[in-house]
Amino acid sequence: GETIGILGGGQLGRMLAMAAARLGYRCHIYAPEDHSVAAEVSAAHTQAAFDYAAGLSAFAADCAVVTYEFENVPVAPLAALGEVPVFPHPRALETAQDRLNEKTFVTELGGTPAPFAPVDSPEDLRAAIAKIGTPGILKTRRDGYDGKGQWRIMSPEDAEGLDLPDQPLIYEGFVHFSAEFSVILCRGQDGEIRYFDSAHNRHEDGILALSTVPAPDAITAQVPAARELAAKVADALDYVGVLTLEFFATEAGPVFNEMAPRVHNSGHWTIEGAVTCQFENHIRAICGLPLGSTELAADAVEMRNLIGEAANDWAEILKDPANHLHLYGKGDVRPGRKMGHVTRLTFD
Ligand code: ATP
Ligand code: MG
Ligand code: MG
């Protein structure tokens, strides 16, 4: 079979590689770690070493197509690859890896994010708070995930003592939402789009804890508008693969939070809970194959993340035939680290 290159060595890469293997592909992982959980299930592993750009072109030369499971990778060397197709296109990566870019882009397409303003100095922050008000959240524009690089600002005084990090920031108004949900779609090379059911996502300490399908009415009523925006984003980027948009359900309709140009934690339930999971559909899309059905494969699905949990009573979990256990093979347990997840399927 042909070789797929995956940038990033985390659990998303691991699950992509497992889906690719089922379709007869080999995967090569490009990651800076000596040892990654994705490389464990893949044909080969290349360290990014010291020169990411130079290493990347050698890596890509062995691949029929290159994709990514992590958005915080340098765009320029990817865009310069030339011969080897990169899906989703590096432009999607460029848009999504900077919160200011993605919010501006989505606003131009008719979407509604929380009010926002770029912050590069204490004066900017004061001006942003004067314009947008409190409470709000100050976030790094780049590199944040699982709520890292965020500061909640409850009053203008909160901002005064802050030791601002030396990187571009964005201040956004706090959204009073009734629930959070995501739109996960897959777009093929011919432009066909398929949507997975939107999960109701619950976060704890800024980290996704629980996703459930079907979502309550407060969410399903807002899914059509959210899908319409997601399709505009996908079409505008000539997107190929799985794309995720996170939303807040509010009285005024769906408020866009952020996008991820990749498979997403809130779609892990699709491995057992949909006819074709997000990982397989991503592989199908980037390889130019027909997309698989995104229909539900159960009446209800619940996906719970195992966060910072070392040992657990796996036997107890596995005794229940409704449960599907996924462990990512991460050696060191740290607070807030995603170690695995459990998906529960139920049938009426
Ligand atoms: P991810 O791991 O999803 O990439 P992230 O670090 O990019 O996370 P965000 O999605 O920006 O972080 O925020 C994490 C969570 O914090 C959100 O899912 C939501 O629960 C809360 N949150 C973020 N921004 C806002 C906001 N403007 N108003 C209200 N809650 C917010
Ligand atoms: Mg994010
Ligand atoms: Mg998020």
Image (tube, rainbow, N blue to C red):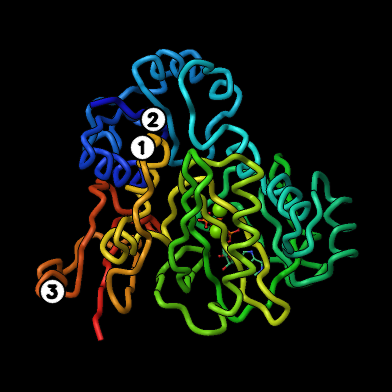
> What quarter of the picture does the N terminus occupy?
top left
Residue 63 vs residue 47, the one in the foreground: 63
Circle 3 residue = 321
x, y percent for residue 241: 46, 43
Residue 35 against residue 299 in the figure, above or below: above
Side of 123 relative to 34 (left or right)? right
Residue at x-position 19% and y-position 62%: 311
Circle 1 residue = 9
Residue 262's tag is: none
x, y percent for residue 93: 58, 38
Residue 324 against residue 233 in the figure, above or below: below
Q: Amino acid at mark 3?
A: Pro
Looking at the rendering, the quadrant in which ligand 1 lies is bottom right
Residue at x-position 37% and y-position 23%: 64
Circle 2 residue = 31
Q: Helix or strand or loop: what does disc 3 sit on?
A: loop
- For the residues marked 3 and 2, what is the alpha-carbon distance in whole angstroms? 36 Å
Mark 1 vs mark 3, foreground winner is 3
* Residue 69, image quadrant: top left
Side of 163 relative to 318 (left or right)? right
